[in-house]
Image (tube, rainbow, N blue to C red):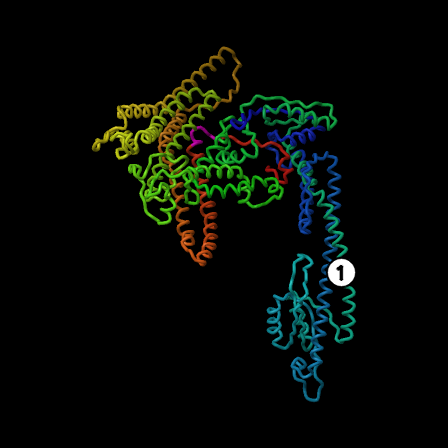
Amino acid sequence: MGSIFRSEEMALCQLFLSSEAAYNCVSELGEIGLVQFRDLNPDVNAFQRKFVHEVRRCDEMERVLRYLEREVEKDKLPILDTGENPEAPQPREMVDLEATFEKLESELREVNSNAETLRRNSLELTELMHVLKATQLFFDERDAEPNSSITQNLLPAEEGKAPVQLGFVAGVTYTERMPMFERMLWRVCRGNVFVRQSAILQRLIDPVTEEEVRKTVFIIFFQGDQLKNKVKKICEGCRGTMYPCPDTAAERKEMGEGVKGRLDDLTTVLTQTTDHRHRMLAGAAKHLRTWFIKVRKIKAIYHALNMLNLDVTNKCLIAECWIPTPDLGRIQEALRKGTEKAGSSMQPIVNRMDTHLQPPTFHRNNKFTQAFQNLIDAYGVASYREVNPALYTTATFPFLFAVMFGDAGHGLIMLCFSAWMVLREKALIASKMSGEIWNIFFGGRYILLLMSFFSIYTGCIYNDIFSKSFNIFGSAWHIGEHANATAEVLEHEEQIMLDPAYKDIYRGDPYPFGMDPMWQISTNKIAFQNSYKMKISIIIGVFHMTFGIVLSLFNHTFFKHTINIFCEFIPQMIFLIGMFGYLCFMIVYKWVMYGCGEQFDTVWQSSCAPSVLIYFINMILLKKDPAIGECNQWMYNGQFTVQLVVLLVALLMVPIILFPKPLIMRHAHRAKVAARQTTEVDIPGSSEDHHEEEFEFSEVFIEQTIHTIEFVLGSVSHTASYLRLWALSLAHAQLSEVLWNMVMVIGLSQSSLVGSIMLYLLFAVWAALTVSVLVLMEGLSAFLHTLRLHWVEFQSKFYKGEGYAFAPLTFKYIISGQEEDD
């Protein structure tokens, strides 16, 4: 409780560790995760530190492990995760790890290289086989049709001479390059070549990328060596692969049989190579997570050791670190354990130091409070030992959200989603789902769970469930001949206006819980709910801000800032309660004193109820409005005098906040300087560094002036800012009602079979819009407005947020599979 209310007390300690035990001691501290080391070598380059060689070795081992991980994922093998937390290996074990990783990497690279070579040879033989088949098919077609155009010479034979024999080139190229290849041949050879092509239907795999590729066999006929050279150059330029193809059918058949035999042998060898690679990776996958943890622990330890200093004898390492005071015993025990493990005879020394440095802020959180702590830290990490707003945010944040998001149906949708995440928490963490949006939702699952519970509660208070109401306890309104005619009124779509002054339709009893459901169908519903929600928002806001000022008292008391209690806390409380607390009093007084019925006198009837806003404005302007008719001019006797006194006292607090504190601080500073000068005169040589900041009265006075103006004006603007509770609640309710009337009412108004089908389709539309717009978008809007009310209106009253987070050496993130931030 103390840690969540206020950060842990921290101690700056100096550690003296023997060189042979330093590694094991730091390893034990990393397992505990409660020590933040200070860098004692800030001016030393990272490449010049003592253990930079070990860090580089760890980087190299991590590179090999990432390579193995990629290969394992490529084979879609599961990486075994037993949840084991192995200890950090001893420095001498690094050699064994390096040898193991180097052997695995070299073997795997050799196997991959062999497999790639085999796949390339297999691809070439497959292409050659298709070239032989396509060539044979072409010549078979020529023999079957001797008079076809493809048997004619490209150039006419001269009279009395034999026809010119055609030469040909066969090969393979990518299918998508074939049109460009044909155009190039046509243009360069000026149409003096003949091209035949045949697509390869067999699935071909690229030997390097292992992706499927599409290729086409081409056969090019030409005359003469000149065209032959041109054709070959074009094939090479277009990255086509040419294969030797015999001229006779017998030679082609013999060559094809040889290629088929070689291809079968190659397939067998490739299968064996793939199986061997798979077995290697399967064995590595069993130990991969453990290896990662070991290497990352070693690397983290050496990073920490690089922050330490060596003493003059080079036998001892000196460290400075922040440690939570309650855990000093655990730290000393861990150091003793590390020393015993290393077999060192020199016991570690923990020396607590006096310092003027600001310690880090450390809050102990569990998985429930951590989400709320993250909201606060996003604004600013709490100053050391400052009151932590996260404790109170666990209640106020979901409540203020629910005031704006008050719909029991929408809250139920949120409850189902958040409960699913909470109940399947361990499985979802183990699945390591990625995605920034998902991580945000999952990290705030407990916030979402509380917000859904509060939303269901406020939805029941508003009696609002998907823009509809439930008449559970029976309405106090009498419409027509029936006492509870809500269903009848809904069926006949009558327009009614509810007025408690009419006793023939209102029996005067309040609805047992929440709002009467009859307000849902009245024409003056918005006017009634606006008045109620607006005034409730003001009351909630004033209580919230007052609580923030009360928390500042805990800060002033803890830090012994007595001057702040009398010059800030008390005047601020009087100002805020005097002005806006009185406004809340008038709201409640009006609710209690004014009403309808015979028990109220004429002057206390609702028709004589004054406007609280007008009264508050008149109070500021010292103005009096005359009485109207039989109504009283004032809400109670002596109201003008009370308001005048309240206003004067509140205004008197402004100079009390502004002037006394800077003057008192200047007087205290002068007295301290005079006392120190007297001490130095009486005791020569007693001057020392007092670590005091220079006091500038002008700066202090300007800062106090800004603080005063900010508080006075902020009291007005912050109170008005809480009206967003009313505005967003109204907007959410109206959007929900409009969506119902424009979508669901269309289907519900139909009574035929077609209407049933329409209702089925329209319900899907309504459900999709409800989840996407009313739950997600409106929920995000309400969340952001709630965040602003806490960051600005609430926390500005007491929270500075000028600290820095406690960042200990911890192996927690390494074990969970996340990279620890440097």
Residue furthest to the front: 481
Q: Residue at 61% of width from left, 74% of height from top?
A: 186
Q: Nearer the viewer, residue 20 or 421?
A: 421
Q: Looking at the image, which residue sits at the far bottom?
A: 160
Which sits in the foreground, 526 or 807?
Answer: 526
Q: In which quarter of the image is the C terminus?
A: top right
The residue positioned 61% from the left and 43% from the top of the image is 432
Q: What element carries label 1?
A: helix
Highlighted magenta segment, given as a residue range: 794-801
As shown in the figure, which amino acid type bears the numbered disc 1?
A: Thr
**Residue 797 part of the magenta segment:** yes
- The percent coordinates of residue 10 (x first, y second) are 57, 25
- Picture coordinates of residue 411, whole percent (x, y): 47, 41
Question: Residue 39 placed where, x, y %?
Answer: 60, 31
Which image quadrant for residue 550?
top left
Residue 260 covered by magenta stretch: no
Say which of 6 and 577 sits in front: 577
Q: Quadrant of the N terminus?
A: top right
- Residue at mark 1: 267
736 relative to 393, above or below: below
One can see residue 337 in this view: yes
| Vertical comparison of 322 with 408: above or below | above
Q: Quadrant of residue 225?
A: bottom right
Q: Which residue is nearer to you in this view: 461 or 449?
A: 461
